[in-house]
Image (cartoon, rainbow, N blue to C red):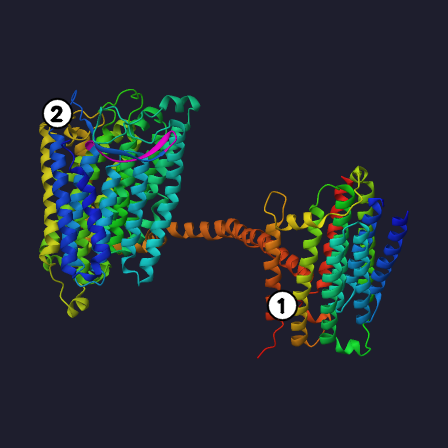
Amino acid sequence: MIPVQYFLVLSALLFFIGVYGFISRRNLIAMLISIELVLNAVDINFAAINRLLFPGLNEGFFMTLFSIGVSAAESAVAIAIILNVYRNFKSDTVDSITNLKR
Amino acid sequence: MANIVMFCILAVVILGSAVLCVTTTRIMRAATFMLFVLFGVAGLYFLLDYTFLGAAQISIYAGGVTMIYVFAIQLVSKRTLQGMVERMKGSRVIFGAFMSLVGLATVTFIVLKNKFICMAGQVMDTEVPMAKIGTALVGSEKYQYVLPFEFISVFLLACIIGGLVVARKEE
Amino acid sequence: MEYGYTAFILLLPLLSFLVLGLAGMKMQHKVAGLIGTCSLGLVTILSYMTAFQYFTADRVNGIYQTIVPYNFTWLPLGNLHFDMGILLDPISVMMLIVISTVSLMVHIYSFGYMHGEKGFQRYYAFLSLFTMSMLGLVLATNIFQMYMFWELVGVSSYLLIGFYYPLKPAIAASKKAFIVTRFADMFFLIGILTFGYYTDSFSFSFAGDIVMGQGTTPFIEGNMAKAVTAGACIIPTALVLMFIGGAGKSAMFPLHIWLPDAMEGPTPVSALIHAATMVVAGVYQIARMFPLWIQYAPEAMSIVVWVGVITAFYAAAVACAQSDIKRVLAFSTISQIAFMMVALGVSLPGHEAILDNHAQLGYMAGMFHLFTHAMFKACLFLGAGCIIHAVHSNEMFYMGGLRKYMPVTHVTFLISCLAIAGIPFFSGFSSKDEIITACMHYSPVVGWIMTGIAAMTAFYMFRLYYGIFWGTENVEAHEHHTPHEAPATMTIPLIVLTVITLGVGIYTTLGGFLGWGGSFGAFVSASGQDYTIHFDPQIAATSTIIAILSICLATYIYKGESQPIADRLYKTFPKLHRAAYKRFYQDEIWQYVTHRIIFRCVSTPIAWFDRHVVDGTFNFLAWGANEAGESIRPWQSGDVRQYAVWFLTGAVALVLILLCI
């Protein structure tokens, strides 16, 4: 069987690639895509640990299932907000929603 | 052995697509690479004998979410679609990359040095039976998940309606 | 308890003050005046009842009992406690009679004098407040209650001196009075606190039996032994500090500066407050603490004596050169109060264990002089008020030859002048003679000095008398309006006070010469026992002859139509006259001390420190907080990605820290 460290390292790499993408991209949708990467990394983590370290229990499995569902919902709402932002500010970059800045 | 080979292939696919996804300048390509990542993750689930999970991943993520993103891109980034590219700003990128590397190093270090990964138990070779998943999802005993299941249904409904309200066109 | 009605003596004036103060403006003048006068009439009746009941009650071992109808703890503080109560003993009952009588006379008199004044109701309200405060002061059961009412009396005095507050001199005078007495009261307070700290008690406890009345707390014996072992000069120090407070209120040199200026108030106020009652509060305080002075601070009594002597001489000298009749009377008051202080101070040493009536003759004499002085000085002031009312000015320049126009005032003023000069058969003779006798027993030097001052008293009082009622008339002023006798409301009090003066005078003179007994010593004396006054014929004769000589001198100089001798003296000693006229520059000296020395050298640096250092610190802190806020504000940039970076950085840093620990 595959040792669990491999899965964990993979998920850590995927997580930080997603974080890097979130920080460095200006386009709102690209930032959202990076967040999806992060969430997927987390799902891998849950599944792997559950399967390989605690074979009798299923908590991780269901956690992953629900996480997938929640991610989908959250993407939908985020896209709705971005549509609104586009309508109001006529722009799809994150610099345009900095109204708090002086 | 075959598992490890399969794992390596999947890992390469996932990581490569992810890197390309975050570094490309054209947004449609980013969406496509994300799709590949999602497929790769589904493959990993199949590797772990979580077939139901893999199926859910493909149908929800790869199917639904990616479509949402493509539609959103069409609606929002017209100019980008038409070939305009996004510029990358210098200093923040470097700082972000640096911090990500530091974070990565930290997390990996913790994970690998930790003792709990040594307690890998006996792994069953069979997948989780579907009946068990079903009863667990809607069962109401101690370790069963009817409450989160109901909650997530309501939650999804709320998000759909919320999304509709937020994205409605002003009259 | 049969003395329960004494509570009304305090409550009635308080009630009258509240009613007149709050609702006075809506009443007519007459109604307000009637309310004030009637409540005071009731108080007078109650005071006389109390005195009658007290002095005819049984004595124990020939000593009057000290009776405490009420005494309840108001504020308990660990060992000490502030009480409020009523204490009746010979001097407080005597003061009750004095205060209520003079106050009633002033209330009646003010009907006429303040007729038509704006603020009539306010005046009566303040008079009630003053009466209540003074009564509370004399009926105090403990030194702290006395201090409280002391301050209240000061406030009433401030309010009444500044009654004509649209005028600048009145405002300045009221402020001066309040500030000077308040400054002296600081020492009084320090004395009280010292005393309380070392003896654990504020109450007055005396040689006589203390009868517990309807109060709830018994007296605690002052723990005098403890104080004495703590340090031999603690109690004298406390007593002298309290004396300084009393000196301020009683206008002793050099804290007398407020009293002449206090004449800016209405004349009935001067009669009540600054002649008969408030200014004797210092004398009363020493009389109240007299057993303590005798037992624990006999050497300190000499301070009292010499302060009194200097004050008496100074005031008499200044009074000889004043031209404003109220100022002459003010300085005369200062001088007479100094007499009372000297009387209290001249007790013979070596009698600490017991209170011996012969050795402490001064106690009785001082109290007697307080009584008689209140009566005739109030009469003099009220008479001066009638004169001012007739002539519309205070200056002697506008007066002269008024005996034709104002007969009643003339006669009462003359009788009071004879009383203050110390002629037999007038009350002043008995009291002043006793004082001089006591001084002679103490030390012949002091005795002869006081005799000399008594001669000066006779001299300047008769200078005043002749200047007002004899001499040339000021015809031009009289053309505009002829001076007329005052209305009945103003002359009746004069007559009543004169009758008292004459009555007491005749009774005590005859009693002293014929050895009757039943004189003032029957009521008030140092040990509480009956003490019959016998006049020492030598001293009596000496003082009478000297008084008559002074009167003749004054008559010779001032009686005629013009005063050639006075004018020649004035030409020969112009500087001396000017110095005396300007009260020997006391006010200028105080002004210099406060402005140049205290304000410039002490107050200004402190003010600078407060403004720049104390305020500066807080300004600096506020500036720092502001700057910190300004520098943190850019963190809220609205840029989501920046937030994420900092999130990440923070999380990683925390993890690393936790790892390393």
Q: Which mark is on residue C603?
A: none
**Helix, strand or loop under label 1:** helix
Question: Hey, what amino acid is under mark 1?
Answer: Gly
Point 17% across, 51% down: residue: C106
Residue C67 drawn in magenta: no
Query: Amino acid type of disc 2?
Result: Asp
Residue that badge 1 annotates: B163
In percent of the image, x 75 and y 57: which residue is there?
B55
Residue C68 position, x and y percent, is: 21, 31
Q: Please give the residue where the numbered disc 2 appears in the rendered image.
A: C58
Q: Residue furthest front?
A: B131
Give coordinates of residue C524: x percent, y percent: 19, 31
| C87 falls in the magenta region | yes
How far apart in space, not on screen, are marks 2 and 1 (Cα)? 104 Å
The C terminus of chain C - image quarter: top right
Q: Is residue C496 left or right of residue C303?
A: left
Q: Specify start and end residues of the magenta stretch as a single range.
A: C77-90
